[in-house]
Image: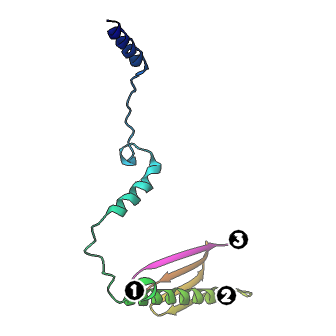
Amino acid sequence: MKKLFTIGLLLLAGLNQLRAQGLVYHPNNPAFGGNTFNYQWMLSSAQAQDTHKDPAAKSSSSASGLNGLSNSSSLQSFSDNLQRQLLSRLSQNILNKQFGEDGLKEGSFTFGDMNVVISNAAEGVIIRITDGKGGESSITVPYL
């Protein structure tokens, strides 16, 4: 009986040490109320596990040019870059010619299918740019 009483006391002492803990769910995914700082980690983790390939994507076995791009896209990139540089140089020359030391000179300039018209108006200097495809842009520089 003494043995049973000792075991009972030990069990009661052990039960005193046990405590219940409330479990609270905290979502990780920001789409379901989780912390927004988890977004980048979850996205990179999902992309790392993605084994599916896009069938519409071009294969890397095609001929490659600069920066791993195909020759046609490298040629297009070069052409676009050259066109931007030429248009920048032409616009600098026009501005220097029109807004030189003598002041504004009205005029019309044509570059391929683009037409630039500079004129004075009551609001200020109007620069109207028209391309051959029907697009038009107008810039008004007010007088100071």
Which callout, 2 or 1, points at the residue further toward the start of the chain? 1
Of helix, strand and loop, which one carries label 1? Answer: helix
Task: Kindly identify the amino acid type of the residue bearing the numbered disc 1.
Answer: Ser
Q: Confirm whether the magenta stretch covers residue 142.
A: yes
What's the residue at 74%, 87% (across, down)? 101
**Which residue is more in the foreground, 20 or 4?**
4
On residue 73, which mark appears?
1
Q: CA distance from mark 2 to mark 3?
A: 19 Å
- Quadrant housing residue 71: bottom left
Residue that mark 3 sits on: 144
Question: In this orientation, does residue 92 appear?
Answer: yes
- Left or right: where does residue 78 sit relative to residue 93? left
Residue that mark 2 sits on: 96
Which callout, 2 or 3, points at the residue further toward the start of the chain? 2
Of helix, strand and loop, which one carries label 2? Answer: helix
- Left or right: where does residue 106 sit relative to residue 63? right
**Which residue is more in the foreground, 12 or 88?**
12
Q: Tell which tag, 2 or 1, sits nearer the viewer.
A: 1
